[in-house]
Amino acid sequence: MQRVTPLILAKACWAEASGYDAIVVNCMVDPGVPELRRTVSIPVIGAGRAAVAVASVLADRPLSIFPGRIRVNALAEDEAYTLKELMSIGRRHVATRGADALTLGCSYLGGAAMRLQDEVGVPVIPTIEVALKIAELIACTGIRPQRLGVPNQRARPLTQWVFREKDRLFGLVERLRRRLRQHS
């Protein structure tokens, strides 16, 4: 995480200077989120915190799952196996630990959320969709963070690029879902 934080910080500063309304860090461990919040004046949404927050709203015993036998950088190598592992772990958490909602321990896995939800019988939070919707909600309502040492600017009207970027990201997620369905 220490190696990616400066890269994320540079991109966030660029995004703020370019007029973006919010920043979404698309990683479940939310690398750099505290540093970003101390640096930029626009809202910073960590995908991990967003997913956990929504799971907590929906359920009393949300739990996070991750296929522990698979390295993060190998999740896409055998998507059918990854999905099988997630289903097994999800079912076990529901049966033995009483999980009534699940978050996925890696944002990459978010494309499998609806498929897993059908298999395990509890809500499975689609990470990037949730984080983007929360960022959109905050930007549309004009909520601006108050941060010590960071000038608070007036919220400006939401621009069309937000919707274009959202559509582009949802397109990527949909392509990933199709790939997961093809491999299963």
Image (tube, grey):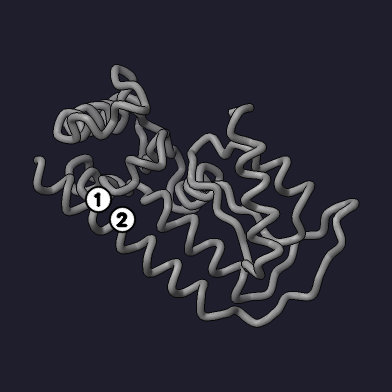
Give the amino acid type for the residue marked by disc 2 in the picture.
Answer: Val
Residue 44 position, x and y percent, is 64, 54
Residue 69 position, x and y percent, is 29, 17
In the displayed structure, 26 sits above or below 70; it is below
Residue contact at pointers 1 and 2, CB within 8 angstroms? yes
Nearer to the camera, 18 or 41: 18
Give the amino acid type for the residue marked by disc 1 in the picture.
Answer: Leu
Mark 2 lies on residue: 173
SS assignment at label 1? helix
- Mark 1 Cα-neighbour bin, 10 Å: few <14, some 14–19, many ≥20: some
- Mark 2 Cα-neighbour bin, 10 Å: few <14, some 14–19, many ≥20: many
Q: Residue 39 — which label?
A: none
SS assignment at label 2? helix
Location of residue 30 (image quadrant): top right
Q: Residues under labels 1 and 2: Cα distance?
A: 5 Å
Residue at (27% x, 27% y) in the render:
89
Location of residue 112 (image quadrant): top left
Classify the position of the N terminus by image quarter: top right
Classify the position of the C terminus by image quarter: top left
In this rendering, does residue 76 appear at all?
yes
